[in-house]
Amino acid sequence: MKFVLEVDMGEAAFEGKAADELGRILRYWGGNLRHYALEPGTGEAVYDSGYREVGGWRITASEAPASPS
């Protein structure tokens, strides 16, 4: 399985406070994951501190490794 987090920081990268905003998102979801079944198909929207949807996280099945040619 894979845990995938995608966050659109917009043109201004959270008005120059990208590290602060991304840290807040990671702390919130890091603490909240225990409430979810960590299995493929699980996921939620991610919001910034202004409660705007900026992305999401999801659990996906692992990709099969590419076979050598």
Image: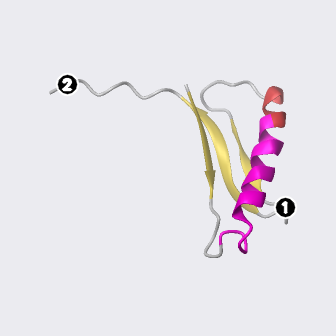
Percent of width and height locating residue 24: 81, 52
Residue 57 sits in quarter: top right
Q: 16 or 12: nearer the eye? A: 16
Q: Is 12 displayed left or right of 60 in the figure?
A: right
Quadrant that contains the C terminus: top left
Quadrant that contains the N terminus: top right
Q: Residues within 10 Å of mark 2 (few under 14, many from 20)?
A: few
| 15 shown above or below 49 | below
Q: Secondary structure at mark 2?
A: loop
- In whole angstroms, how far apart are the C-alphas of marks 1 and 2? 45 Å
Q: Is 6 displayed left or right of 63 in the figure?
A: right
Residue 47 sits in quarter: bottom right
Q: Residue at x 67, y 33 (%)?
A: 42
Residue hosting label 1:
49
Q: Residue at x 74, y 24 (%)?
A: 37
Magenta-colored segment: predominant secondary structure: helix
| 54 shown above or below 31 | below
Q: Secondary structure at mark 1?
A: loop
Percent of width and height locating residue 44: 72, 43
The residue under label 1 is which amino acid type?
Ser
Residue hosting label 2:
68
Magenta span of residues = 13-30
